[in-house]
């Protein structure tokens, strides 16, 4: 049996354990096909807080650094709303991203044909949509200094947030964008506001330089962020890979998410820099939250988590064929009309979390017979 690697499972809170259980079943299916993936499991978020008094223990962090590949469920719940900021479950995820050096956030926006009607846009605009938004995750206005709120001598207040980027920060995210585009359709759209922001001027200059020096085979275009937002609604299929900064990436990836019609179907990945062995530390998670209102009720949609695992196979374990197989199985399940409550439509067949896992495994079985 081929040992493909080891993954740290951090199911977290709410529906996290339920959706991660379906990923574990897919890993079991791969093992039966001769591809073994080791699983280590630990606590994060509210689950870690309840057990250890902190949303992420030093031991769990050390384990994440050692293994380097993390499969993450979800964190949070109303019972933690009144905790101090540093104790909130979400701090566990943020610290993982920081300590693992995860600077590149990959947010695919895919529309499966069977779900095209769920989008708020016309079917012809979104059917077959497959774009990837690459957001720089550790720099920009969310981290720049100085920042804060000060009281002025006249009693009024002044708030400051600072947008800061360096050439190396831009260069490394640009390289990831071009590398991803080479595996896709060979097009990168770099997005900024070079018309009004100095960081945009530097961003455009550095991205162009990386392209010219290292990736001349990839098609590169530049676009202002406001125009990109408009084009995502007007003609979204014109894009392949969009690379942009932290703030614009936050906004544009959420806008693109709504093109798909369901937050419950969207995966994501956060990647670090290549290590001495060429491997990147990485964390994979569904975009949706912990949905505490349906936790334990067998209603959660596991497909975003399964698709996040497919990204893990592709980007961390170099198992693109298996990732393709899983994505095709998801499409087949949807084509046959099976739906969890979040994506239910008239005339479809309602299923729970576990049964959606059953249907997915059945499609995987059918794909090899």
Image (spheres, grey):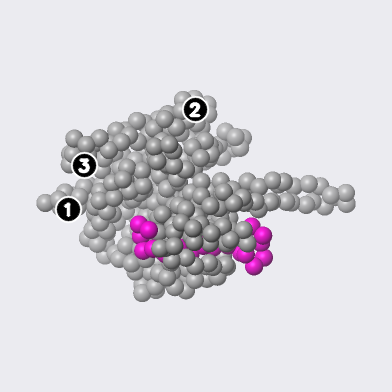
- Image-based side of 97 in relation to 182, left or right: right
- Within 10 Å of disc 1 (Cα), the crowding (few <14, some 14-19, many 20+) is few
Near mark 2 (Cα within 10 A), the count class, few <14, some 14-19 or many ≥20, is some
Q: Check contact, mark 1 vs mark 2: CB within 8 A.
A: no
- Label 3–label 1 contact, CB within 8 A: no
Q: Quadrant of the N terminus?
A: top left
* Residue at image point 52% right, 71% down: 230
Q: Which residue lies furthest to the left in this view?
A: 369
Residue 166 x, y percent position in the rendering = 61, 50
Question: Residue at label 3?
Answer: 29
Q: What stretch is highlighted in magenta?
A: 182-199
Mark 3 and mark 2: Cα distance apart in space: 31 Å
Dot 1 corresponds to which residue?
367
Tell me the number on the disc at residue 57. 2
Label 3: how many residues lie within 10 Å, few (<14), some (14-19) or many (20+)? some
- Please state the horizontal and vertical placement of residue 142, each as a whole percent of the image: 62, 49
Residue 266: quadrant of the picture: bottom left
Along the line of sight, the residue nearer the viewer: 6 or 168: 168
Q: Earlier in the sequence, mark 3 or mark 1?
A: 3
Q: How far apart are marks 3 and 1 (CA)?
A: 12 Å
Of 349 and 164, which appears nearest the observer? Answer: 164
Please tell me which of labels 1 and 2 falls first in the chain.
2
275 versus 139 height, above or below: above
Element type at mark 2: loop
Q: Quadrant of residue 332?
A: bottom left
Q: Which residue lies furthest to the right in this view?
A: 154
Residue at image position (57%, 67%) is 224
Instruction: Please check the rendered image and state whether residue 316 is part of the magenta-colored stretch, yes or no.
Output: no
Say which residue appears at 74% left-offset and 47% top-offset: 149
C-alpha separation, residue under disc 1 versus residue under disc 2: 41 Å
């Amino acid at each position: 049996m081929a040992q493909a690697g080891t993954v740290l499972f951090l199911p977290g809170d709410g529906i996290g354990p339920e959706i991660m259980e379906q990923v574990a079943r897919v890993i079991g299916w791969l093992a039966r096909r001769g591809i073994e993936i080791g699983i280590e499991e630990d606590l994060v978020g509210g689950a870690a807080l309840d057990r250890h008094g902190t949303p992420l223990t030093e031991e769990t962090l050390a384990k994440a650094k050692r293994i380097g590949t993390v499969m993450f469920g979800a964190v949070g719940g109303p019972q933690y709303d009144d905790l101090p900021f540093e104790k909130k479950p979400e701090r566990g995820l943020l610290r993982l991203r920081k300590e693992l050096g995860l600077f590149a956030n990959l947010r695919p926006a895919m529309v499966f044909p069977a779900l095209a009607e769920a989008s708020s846009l016309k079917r012809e605009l979104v059917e077959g949509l497959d774009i990837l938004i690459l957001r720089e995750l550790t720099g920009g206005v969310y981290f720049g200094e100085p920042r804060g709120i000060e009281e002025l001598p006249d009693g009024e207040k002044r708030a400051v947030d600072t947008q800061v980027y360096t050439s190396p920060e831009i260069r490394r995210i640009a390289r990831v964008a071009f590398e991803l585009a080479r595996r896709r359709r060979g097009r990168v759209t770099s997005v900024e506001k070079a018309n009004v922001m100095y960081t945009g001027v530097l961003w455009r200059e550095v991205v162009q330089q990386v392209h010219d020096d290292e990736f001349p085979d990839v098609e590169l275009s530049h676009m202002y962020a406001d125009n990109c937002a408009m084009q995502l609604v007007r003609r979204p299929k014109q894009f392949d890979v969009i690379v942009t900064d932290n703030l614009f990436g936050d906004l544009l990836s959420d806008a693109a998410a709504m093109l798909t019609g369901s937050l419950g179907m969207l995966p994501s990945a956060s990647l670090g820099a290549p290590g001495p062995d060429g491997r990147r530390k990485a964390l994979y998670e569904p975009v949706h939250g912990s949905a505490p209102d349906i936790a334990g009720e067998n209603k959660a949609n596991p497909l975003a988590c399964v698709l996040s695992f497919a990204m893990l196979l592709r980007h961390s374990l170099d198992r693109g064929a298996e990732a393709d197989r899983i994505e095709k199985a998801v499409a087949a399940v949807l084509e046959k009309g099976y739906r969890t409550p979040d994506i239910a439509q008239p005339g479809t067949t309602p299923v729970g979390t576990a049964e959606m896992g059953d249907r997915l495994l059945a499609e995987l079985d059918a794909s090899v017979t």
